[in-house]
Image (tube, rainbow, N blue to C red):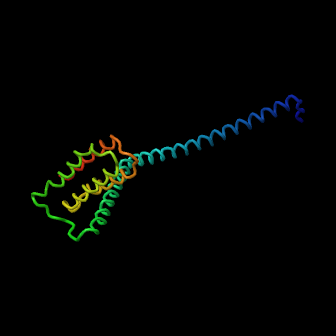
C-alpha cells in the first residue's frame, strides 16, 4: 500500500499550506513578543510618570532656592560694599543717632527727589546722587539703601543720555528708599 504519488497541484497546495502555517506561527510569535514589549514600556511609562510628579512637586522648592540665592548674592554684594566703604573711613562705622539727626538723612534724599526735574545730564545727576549717598552714610553709618544707590549710579553711568522715564524710575526708587530708611 504505497501512497499514491501526489499530483503537482497537491504538491503546490501542500507548499502553500506549509507557508500559511509557518506565517501563522510567526505571526502569533511576533504578537506575543509585541505584547511583552508593550508591557515593559507600560511599566517604564508608569515609573516616568511617578518621577515626573516628584519633579513637579520640587519645582516650587527649586524656585524658592533660586530666589534665596539671588537674595543672598544681593546681601553679599551689600556686605562687600560696606566693607570696602568702611575700610576708607575711620574705625567707628556705627554712629549713634541723636534725636535731631534722626530725620536728616530722609530730608537729604527728599530734597534730591524734589530737584530731579532740574537734571538734564547724567554726570550732574550721578555726582549729586553720589553726594547724597556720602551724606546718608555719614549720618547713618551704613544702610542697605546705600548699596542700592551705588547700583543705581552704576546703571546711570552706563547710559548715554538721560530720559524722562529714567527720572521717573529714579523718583520711584527714591520713594522706595525713603520707606526703607524710615
Horizontally, residue 22 falls left or right of residue 56, namely: right
Question: Viewer-proximal residue, 62 or 99?
Answer: 99
Number of marks in the rendered image: 0
Above or below, 35 against 106 in this view is above
Horizontally, residue 107 falls left or right of residue 87, namely: left
Horizontally, residue 9 falls left or right of residue 133, namely: right
In the orientation shown, which residue stands out farthest toward the bottom? 91
Residue 76 percent coordinates (x, y): 32, 61
Residue 163 percent coordinates (x, y): 35, 42
Q: Residue at x 25, y 59 (%)?
A: 134
Horizontally, residue 160 falls left or right of residue 125, namely: right
Q: Residue at x 82, y 30 (%)?
A: 13
Residue 28 percent coordinates (x, y): 66, 38
Q: Quadrant of the N terminus?
A: top right
Q: Residue at x 22, y 45 (%)?
A: 114
Above or below, 26 against 82 in this view is above
Above or below, 115 against 71 in this view is above
Q: Residue at x 30, y 43 (%)?
A: 167
Question: Viewer-proximal residue, 35 or 11?
Answer: 35
Residue 138 percent coordinates (x, y): 21, 62
Question: Viewer-proximal residue, 122 or 94?
Answer: 122
Above or below, 170 against 146 in this view is above
Amino acid at each position: 500500500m504505497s501512497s499514491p504519488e501526489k499530483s503537482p497541484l497537491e504538491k503546490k497546495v501542500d507548499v502553500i499550506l506549509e507557508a500559511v502555517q509557518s506565517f501563522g506561527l510567526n505571526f502569533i510569535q511576533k504578537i506575543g513578543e509585541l505584547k511583552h514589549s508593550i508591557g515593559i514600556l507600560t511599566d517604564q511609562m508608569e515609573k516616568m510618570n511617578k518621577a515626573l510628579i516628584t519633579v513637579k512637586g520640587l519645582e516650587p522648592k527649586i524656585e524658592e532656592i533660586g530666589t534665596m540665592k539671588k537674595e543672598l548674592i544681593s546681601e553679599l554684594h551689600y556686605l562687600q560694599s560696606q566693607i570696602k566703604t568702611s575700610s576708607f573711613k575711620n574705625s567707628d562705622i556705627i554712629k549713634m543717632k541723636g534725636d535731631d539727626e534722626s530725620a536728616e538723612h530722609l530730608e537729604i534724599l527728599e530734597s534730591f527727589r524734589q530737584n530731579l526735574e532740574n537734571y538734564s545730564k547724567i554726570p550732574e545727576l550721578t555726582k549729586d546722587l553720589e553726594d547724597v549717598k556720602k551724606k546718608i552714610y555719614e549720618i547713618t553709618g551704613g544702610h542697605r539703601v546705600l548699596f542700592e544707590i551705588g547700583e543705581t549710579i552704576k546703571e546711570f553711568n552706563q547710559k548715554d543720555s538721560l530720559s524722562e522715564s529714567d527720572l521717573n524710575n529714579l523718583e520711584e526708587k527714591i520713594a522706595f528708599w525713603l520707606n526703607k530708611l524710615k
